[in-house]
Image: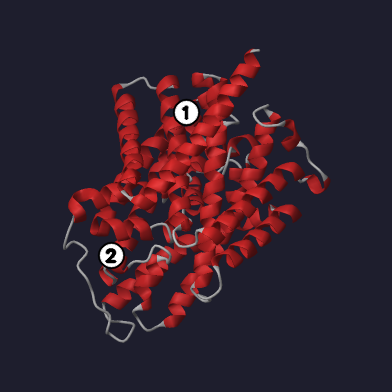
Amino acid sequence: MGDKGQVKNSMSKCTNQTNISWWQLSFIGVGCIIGTGYFLGSAIPIQRAGSSVLLAYLIAGIGTWMVFQALAKLTAHHPEKGSFRTYAKQAYGSWAGFSNGWVYWSAEMLIMGSQLTALGLFAQFWFPRIPLWIFTAGFAGLGLLIILLGVQKVEQMENVFGVMKAAAIVMFILIAGAAMLGWIGDGTGELHSPFKQILPHGGKGLWLALLFAFYGFGGIEVMGLMAQELKDPKDAPKSGNVMLIILTVLYIASFYFVLKLVPAEAINPNESPFLTALKQYHFPWVSHVFNSVLIIAGFSTMVASLYAVTTMLVALAEEGDAPPLFAKKGKMNVPLPAFLLTVFVVAVSIGVAMLLPEKLFEYVTTAAGLMLLYTWIFILASFYKLMCKTAWDLTQTIIGLVLILFAISGTLMNGVSRIGFFVSIGFILLIGLATFIKEKRDKA
């Protein structure tokens, strides 16, 4: 991810096509958005919200649709190379473009850390005694090597990886359905009622789950950026409608089967809920195959994020929003200074994994989800300033903003998520200070 509009890395990482149709964009979006936030991050809201997680993902789907509609309309009527970052600059000035770019870069770095942690946890499914940091270091090293040697071959495979992610969800639904009907397994698995308690903990669980539900839809910015590649950019809202309907249905159906096969309190945040649900049935080959798909899918997303944060840093440097040093490219056209900064941040992530392995994924995922939602707030604010013309536009913007703020506030209701909230606030304060210094320097 990252400021993909300026360097077109979001488009290249999901497709190499140009002049694509709206339905192609819909399915590309499904592949780009499904990631570790769904495959592992969904364990947290399922554990906290129980059956109300179904409502949480429905609400998040609606809120995401409103944000996407705003971005798609901006893109359709004002195609810009910098997409949401450029719209923020046009709406509120250079400070908004600068801060929005760095907020999104920070979000992507945290998301990358979340993906590395998820990959390590997936690998621990097979090797539980090996420390998490060894796996994160191994996956990070392999990903960085690919970036250094050239990511083009990986980009060409992203569509295949996207199909694998969607196929993994469909595979789980089919296997879970067959297990429920007694067609596979030894028949000893106990079925549960997902709707025994609609709002556990008086609705607090739903509130706590909303952020992670929104995080599961992270990546719609890619759809807005790629709308420039449509045969008719005005079809962008239509492609988003189809994409979000498909995703929301897949998400809710898969979570329903999870809750049918295993009680919410048995879900472990450090293990994919789908593996947890399947383990009680004695067909181990299924869980191993499914875990292999999770690792492949997660690794592809992690490599794409590594590439995105590196190239986006170059784009920021080229526009004067980052030190010029990061725009320099060396042999093989690799932006070595930007690459080295990415290596440093990855090393810090691995160090954190060594110090805080127990709750690391939840800390990082909370902070990453929050930083992503801050970017979405920028998108809604830019739409309000540049294009909000009708009562429906205003209503849609307000409802989307309220849902996002509601999700953000829910993180304060839990001790672990609260830490992630303060981490995100720390990033915002640092970016705010950098923005203030830059504005003072530019005016001097």
The Cα atoms of the two marked residues, 2 and 1, are separated by: 40 Å
User: Residue 70: x percent and y percent?
Assistant: 41, 31
Dot 2 or dot 1: first in sequence order is 1
Q: Quadrant of residue 153?
A: bottom right
Residue type, numbered disc 2? Ala
Q: Residue at x 59, y 57 (%)?
A: 350
- Few, some or many C-alpha atoms within 10 Å of disc 1 (few <14, some 14-19, many ≥20)? many
Q: In which quarter of the image is residue 399?
A: top left
Q: Report the number of numbered marks.
A: 2
Q: Quadrant of the C terminus?
A: top right
Q: Residue at x 83, y 47 (%)?
A: 331
Residue type, numbered disc 1? Leu
Q: Name the residue under label 2.
A: 264
- The local secondary structure at tag 2 comes to helix
- Which mark is in front, 2 or 1? 2
Left or right of 153 in this view: 102 = left
Q: Taking the image as drawn, is residue 150 in sight? A: no
The vertical placement of 65 against 440, above or below, is below
- The local secondary structure at tag 1 comes to helix
The vertical placement of 185 against 165, above or below, is below
Q: Residue at x 48, y 51 (%)?
A: 364
Q: Mark 1 points at which residue?
A: 74
Q: Taking the image as drawn, is residue 187 in sight? A: yes
The vertical placement of 310 against 400, above or below, is below
User: Residue 411: x percent and y percent?
Assistant: 35, 45
User: Residue 321: x percent and y percent?
Assistant: 64, 28
In front: 327, or 421?
421
Which of the numbered marks, if any, corresponds to residue 13? Answer: none
Q: Which residue lies furthest to the front in this view?
A: 355
Left or right of 117 in this view: 338 = right
